Image (spheres, rainbow, N blue to C red):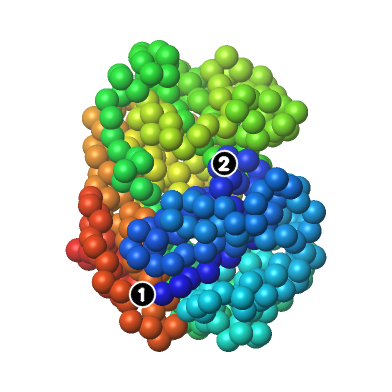
């Protein structure tokens, strides 16, 4: 099969951690990579955001087509909608020039979905859509700070109607599609995000801290992700303050993310806001901002931490909890969206309400006071991640959706090592894993 992945603002070539570089970049890169390893021809179409980028880049057996749509500079995704007609026309012309046709187009995000609908109308290419975030859910949580126009809702409504299949990333995502968009549950497949077992695995904590020059005797909390308000990092800073001062449990927070390799308030204004909160809460000396980090070194940070924390206001899925679990690190997460699916409360970690620093502080103190409980949750999280959330299993579940909508026969693929999720019907494999 020949597959076109469309990801208008989230390129697989980008470094994750910036304002518009995060889970979707990682998702597209890993899905494309796994499909290519399994013998599929995969092209990723993303907007050219640098003038020196070639039309076609190569990435581990994948073609990345840098689509000329709008100015070749980095722009916030909220202003890209006017360029999508240009994006679509380029892709239609590109498709027509290809010696062999694309069997399936997989759109990621609603603007890519708009492009996908234009291509489907022009060429008849079957369309699969993953929203990654739903506009109506975003508006509920962000209100006036949501920078997308109301036109987004109409586009998403059309996509729910016209896509040959819609991918929900967790049961909450499916419920939102049904309740807020009137989606037909029979046309929804639940396929989660994943992690790469060759990239994330447990290692000795002492050795990990030695490599980072972190003190061995500290209780260290790690937060990693995009530096935007909805990720709730301010909640984590406040929780650290309560843990240290009200609960008398010494804890240190290390934060990875931003638009530069060094923590820079000019490049990443959110860091300045968070540092102000840390000063107000009396923990400026216990909150450390590390800036952006390449993925090749993230395993060390996950393993060096005592606990990984992520408390966003809402989260369609959330890849970082899986990466922490894959390293055997317990997770404290907000009880929202996909985090409720990946983290089993009381077993692989703890779930707390979003925007509730008191509950977060109590959860941190619980794990600090009971190292045995923390180790047990880390081990259970590792088992769950390997059983249910490998990128190999995700790609195989998607491949079955592609085959169904394209009416094609799946190619025979070699079993990847260190995975427990089989090919099989997408919904069963995605929700229950191979042994469910």
SS category of the residue bearing label 1: helix
- Identify the residue at horizontal 65%, vertical 85% (top origin): 121
Q: Estimate the x, y position of residue 280 in percent, counting from the top left.
A: 67, 22
Asked where in the image residue 429 lies, by quadrant, the reply is: bottom left
Whether residue 185 sits left or right of residue 198 in the image: it is right
**Image height of 282 relative to 335, above or below:** above
Can you tell which mark lies on residue 127?
A: none
- Identify the residue at horizontal 49%, vertical 51% (top origin): 59
Residue 242 visible, this orientation: no
Disc 2: which residue:
15
Q: Estimate the x, y position of residue 326 in percent, counting from the top left.
A: 32, 42
* The N terminus sits in image quarter: bottom left
SS category of the residue bearing label 2: loop
103 vs 349, nearest the viewer: 103
Whether residue 416 sits left or right of residue 227 in the image: it is left
Asked where in the image residue 159 lies, by quadrant, the reply is: bottom right
Disc 2/disc 1 C-alpha distance (Å): 29 Å
Disc 1: which residue:
400
Asked where in the image residue 392 lies, by quadrant, the reply is: bottom left
Q: Estimate the x, y position of residue 398 in percent, counting from the top left.
A: 40, 69
Residue at the extreme front of the image, as rendered:
99
Q: Residues within 10 Å of mark 1 (few under 14, many from 20)?
A: some
* The C terminus sits in image quarter: bottom left
Residue 279 visible, this orientation: yes
């Amino acid at each position: 099969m020949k597959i076109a992945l469309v990801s208008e603002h989230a390129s697989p070539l980008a470094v994750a951690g910036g304002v518009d570089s995060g889970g979707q970049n990682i998702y597209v890169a890993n899905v494309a990579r796994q499909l290519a390893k399994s013998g599929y021809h995969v092209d990723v179409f993303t907007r050219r955001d640098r003038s020196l980028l070639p039309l076609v880049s190569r990435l581990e057996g994948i073609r990345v087509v840098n689509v000329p749509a709008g100015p070749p500079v980095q722009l916030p995704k909220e202003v890209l909608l006017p360029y999508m007609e240009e994006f679509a026309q380029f892709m239609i012309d590109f498709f027509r020039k290809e010696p062999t046709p694309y069997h399936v187009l997989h759109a990621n995000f609603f603007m890519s979905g708009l492009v996908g609908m234009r291509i489907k109308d022009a060429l008849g290419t079957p369309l699969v859509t993953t929203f990654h975030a739903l506009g109506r859910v975003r508006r509920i949580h962000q209100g006036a700070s949501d920078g997308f126009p109301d036109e987004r809702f109409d586009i998403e409504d059309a996509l729910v109607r016209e896509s040959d299949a819609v991918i929900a990333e967790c049961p909450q995502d499916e419920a939102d599609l049904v309740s807020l968009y009137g989606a037909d549950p029979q046309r929804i497949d639940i396929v989660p995000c994943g992690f790469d077992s060759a990239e994330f695995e447990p290692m000795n904590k002492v050795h990990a801290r030695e490599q980072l020059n972190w003190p061995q005797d500290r209780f260290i909390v790690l937060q990693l992700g995009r530096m935007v308000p909805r990720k709730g990092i301010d909640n984590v800073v406040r929780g650290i303050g309560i843990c240290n001062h009200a609960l008398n449990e010494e804890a240190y927070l290390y934060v990875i993310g931003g638009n530069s390799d060094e923590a820079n308030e000019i490049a990443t204004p959110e860091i300045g806001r968070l540092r102000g909160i840390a000063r107000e809460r009396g923990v400026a000396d216990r909150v450390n901002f590390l800036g952006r980090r390449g993925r090749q070194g993230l395993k060390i940070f996950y393993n060096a931490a005592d606990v990984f924390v992520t408390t966003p206001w809402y989260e369609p899925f959330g890849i970082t909890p899986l990466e922490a679990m894959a390293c055997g690190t317990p997770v404290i997460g907000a009880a929202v969206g996909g985090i409720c699916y990946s983290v089993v409360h009381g077993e692989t970690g703890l779930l707390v309400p979003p925007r509730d620093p008191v509950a977060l502080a109590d959860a941190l103190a619980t794990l600090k006071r009971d190292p045995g409980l923390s180790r047990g949750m880390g081990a259970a999280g590792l088992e769950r991640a390997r059983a249910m959330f490998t990128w190999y299993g995700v790609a195989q579940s998607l491949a079955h959706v592609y085959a169904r909508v394209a009416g094609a026969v799946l190619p025979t693929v070699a079993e990847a090592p260190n995975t427990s999720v089989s090919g099989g019907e997408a919904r069963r494999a995605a929700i229950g894993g191979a042994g469910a």
